Amino acid sequence: MCGIVGYVGPRDAAPLILDGLQRLEYRGYDSAGLAVQNGHGVQVRRDVGKLANLRTRVERDPVDGQIGIGHTRWATHGVPAERNAHPHVSMNGDFVLVHNGIVENYLVLKDELSAEGVTFTSETDTEVIVHLIEKYAEITGTSDEAQIVSAVRQAVSRLTGAHAIVVLPVRKPDVLIAIRIGNAGGVAVGLGEGENFIASDIPAILEHTRRMIYLEHRQMAVVRAGGVSVLGPDGAPVDAQVHHVAFDAVSAAKGSYKHFMQKEIFEQGRAITDTLAGRVDRERGTVVLSDLALTPARAVAINRIVSVACGTSYYSALVGKFYLEKLARVAVEVEYGSEYRYRDPLLTPETAVLAITQSGETVDTLAAMEHAKTCGSPVWSIVNVIGSQAMRMADGYVAMNVGPEIGVASTKTFTASIVDQYLLAVALGAARGTLTAGAQLEAIDDLAKLPDILGRTLALDGTIHALAGTLFEARDFLYLGRGIQYPIALEGALKLKEISYIHAEGYPAGEMKHGPIALIDQHLPVVAIALRDALYDKMISQIEQVKARGGRVIALATEGDTFIASKADDVLYLPPCPPLLSPVMTALPMQLLAYHIAVWRGADVDQPRNLAKSVTVE
Ligand code: AGP
């Protein structure tokens, strides 16, 4: 949450910062700001709302300098307003700062600083940090680097919570200081030639460099045009690892699509091919997950898996439970990261913890991983963002390999993470001896059918667009599914809520009669997943129950099922699909329906209100 960019080098800083922020806007778009410094002082520009407003502001009132910082905000403390936008400036103007995270003890610190005569100009928690740094700089106006670094360290030691901070010391105009405390989104330092960059997420700076240092907890980077020093918690220099990042920059562009979300929905056929590439050997019938570090001994020793995730990734984990239990015969519990961290969960070294997170930066999921590590449990992650904390923190990982997902609502990473869990289940099943060679081959053959099935499913786009035109004024929706389709009903409802702001609920179809049935009338569209599978007859009964009460049913059904057309008001026909993999297919019409309804309503599909792509605060 919140995007941060920093630059120091020979080039004009403002355009670089603005372009970097543009690529991070999915992290927050309540306000944006930048500070650029030159030999004559620092210039700060801030504006409320989207980055475009800041761009206009900077065009009207240009800034000039070769070092600077920028921020795009997802509001936590203080309404979206210019006074609460970052960067924040210390009272005497010696320090300027951008921040991602929450200062949990900010009220105490604010009282302390106020009593000492500091005047606050915002309602943010962040502002205390910049004043604290100035306080600890001891001699106002100091340009001594060691003193400045020490002041930042002292100030940060007073904060509770998790933080990513970049400081621009006005009196030392050739240096930026970045620091990471805990898991408030990463801090990457990009190494260029005679110039260096800072970003909370690497897409912001990948255009300029592929060489990255990721700051670890309590590390600080002193960044100059000519070099970067990384300091450990005690201030001693650290030999930081430089990562070389491969990235498909083209796939981060919208191309001919109207929205990133639309593009990402349509990419899924290809994306699944990328997810499978190099992992399945169809000749031998094996799955190879080389980054997972799964030894046969470990695979056999595991007697339980706890999957932790949030939001869409949580629903993906609910699907994965079916795979791991059926194919690898290991018991799975699925937990919300945000709930799990506040229990005292029972974990042993025989329980593997599987974190599913496209961003790899979701703070609640990371906290669950940390807890698992302290219990001695093996920790795996399924991530899309290479180099993210969830990837680096895990003992082993499975990458989604689907390229950057820019739309705030997850689509291709949802289906890719389901496929990754299927691969994991096959690999585990093979190692645990729960899958025969023939069953492995069959599972892999099924996977190979997916790109074609997804391509055929996406051909429903026009039909769904027209259907959405008849539904977009509804105030509530109910989504029903059973068994492995229940998580897809949950995900369908979440997608609709996120981007169209229509209230929607996902429900296990068999539970409808225990309460939600009271909601049904002619105004409530009910989206029911009723494929020709083992639960088909049950789903038909539930559709009958909705129809008997005047509800409008939109059914997702299997091609050739003419019977269902006599029951449902609208039918979306999907190609035959191997039952275990059918959630990957049914997710697509759910995404398209939400997308088209949102477009009909004129909503901001890629940047829905109040949301952010990486949720790095609690
Ligand atoms: C998905 O559409 C949502 N924006 C959200 O629920 C998301 O899935 C959740 O925040 C978890 O994100 P992660 O996968 O990056 O951990």
Image (cartoon, helix red, strand yellow):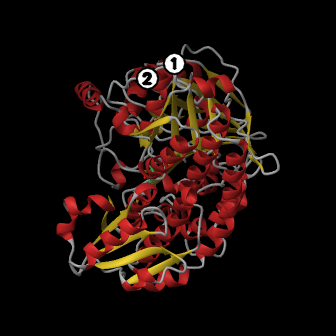
Mark 1 surroundings within 10 Å by alpha-carbon count, few (fewer than 14), some (14 through 19), many (20 or more): some
Query: What is the x, y in percent for residue 124?
Result: 32, 42
Q: Which mark is residue 376?
A: 1
Judge by depth and name the residue closer to the eye, 384 or 197.
384
Residue sitting at x 55%, y 42%: 200
Q: How many marks?
A: 2
Q: Is the residue 170 above or below the residue 546 in the image? A: above
Q: Is residue 223 left or right of residue 181?
A: right
Q: Is residue 379 visible?
A: yes
Q: Would you say the beta carbon of the disc 2 residue lies within 8 angstroms of ligand 1?
A: no
Of label 2 and label 1, which has the lower sequence position? Answer: 2
* Residue under numbered circle 2: 347
Residue 516 horizontal side relative to residue 56, left or right: left
Give the residue type at disc 2: Leu
User: Residue 550: x percent and y percent?
Assistant: 22, 81
Q: Position of residue 439 (x, y in %)?
A: 67, 47
Residue at 68%, 63% in the rendered image: 449
Secondary structure at numbered mark 1: loop
- Near-viewer residue (120 or 260): 260
Q: Do the numbered discs 2 and 1 sit on residues whose CB atoms are within 8 Å?
A: yes
Disc 1 residue type (three-letter): Gly
Q: Camera-side residue: 534 or 503?
A: 534
Find the residue positioned furthest to the right.
283
Q: Quadrant of residue 134?
A: top left
- In the image, taking residue 416 as reference, residue 247 lies left or right, namely right
Residue at image location 44% in from the left, 31% down from the top: 368
**Dot 2, how many residues are within 10 Å of its Cα: few (below 14), some (14-19), or many (20+)?**
some
Above or below, 103 relative to 152: below
Q: Is residue 126 visible?
A: no
The label number, if any, that marks residue 283 in the structure image: none
**Which secondary structure lies at badge 2?**
loop
